Amino acid sequence: MMGRTHLALGAVAGVHLAAATPRLGLPIMAAALIGAILPDVDTPYSKLGRRLWPLSRIILMTFGHRGGTHSAVFLILATAAMWFVSPPVGLAFGAGIATHLAADAVSFGHGTRFTARGAGVPLLWPLSERKAGLRLVKVNGALENLVILPWVTLYAVQLGWRLV
Ligand SMILES: [Zn+2]
């Protein structure tokens, strides 16, 4: 999926978790949003990858897009690292990453910008490079931009509105 859709999905996770721990609302929201776009640090064409392009280029050349940063190992290690800082913030970070992996698992890339042309994510990396997923949503296609993105954004906003 595109970065904006990942951010909207991360916002839904963040708002739910912020409601459970309101005193840490802002760090929880921030962790969920960063987690939601973190796996795409493996391509210089993503929101995060553009800002960190020397790093993202190295990761792309080493692992390819939708490689190790889209695996269960990455999810667990990144969540654990943040958990040591603060368990509620670590949980939100992990939830953001999990929304990213779930969204990419049901979407497929197109064109040369995506070295990963097939659908899915390599959940069992590095044990297996095989991608698990379904070709349901075309990245940057009409379903993503005209249906999923507006509905998920509206849902996150109306949930967040109640917290303010
Ligand atoms: Zn991704």
Image (cartoon, grey):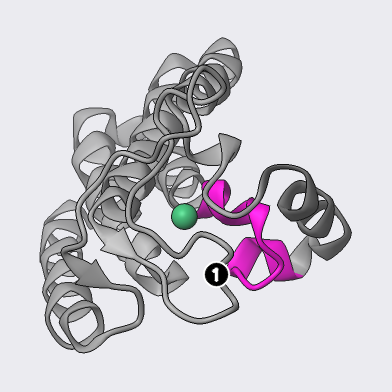
- Residue 74 coordinates in the image, percent (x, y): 54, 27
Quadrant (top left/top right/bottom left/bottom right) for the N terminus: bottom left
Question: In the visual, does 49 lie left or right of 17?
Answer: right
Q: Which residue does the numbered mark 1 point to in the structure image?
A: 114
Q: Is residue 54 above or below residue 30?
A: below
Residue 6 part of the magenta segment: no
Q: Quadrant of the C terminus?
A: bottom left
The image quadrant that residue 110 belongs to is bottom left
> In the image shown, does 116 or 10 lie closer to the viewer?
116
Residue drawn at x 34%, y 74% is 139
Label 1 neighbour load within 10 Å: few <14, some 14-19, many 20+: some
Task: Write down the region rendered in magenta.
Answer: 37-50
Instruction: Please identify the quarter of the rendering in which residue 137 is found.
Output: bottom left
The prevailing secondary structure element of the residues shown in magenta is helix
Q: Quadrant of residue 117?
A: bottom left
Find the residue positioned furthest to the right.
54
Q: Is mark 1 within 8 Å of ligand 1?
A: no
Secondary element type, mark 1: loop
State the residue at coordinates (30%, 45%): 99
80 lies above or below 11: above
Q: Looking at the picture, how far across and down is residue 67, in whole percent?
A: 56, 42
Q: Relative to 114, is 89 on the left or the right? A: left
Residue 25 can be seen in this image: no
Residues 127 and 25: in front is 127
- Tell me, yes or no, whether the highlighted magenta stretch contains residue 39: yes
Q: Amino acid at mark 1?
A: Phe
Query: Residue 88 in the image: x percent, y percent?
Result: 39, 22
Look at 38% across and 40% down and name the residue there. 131
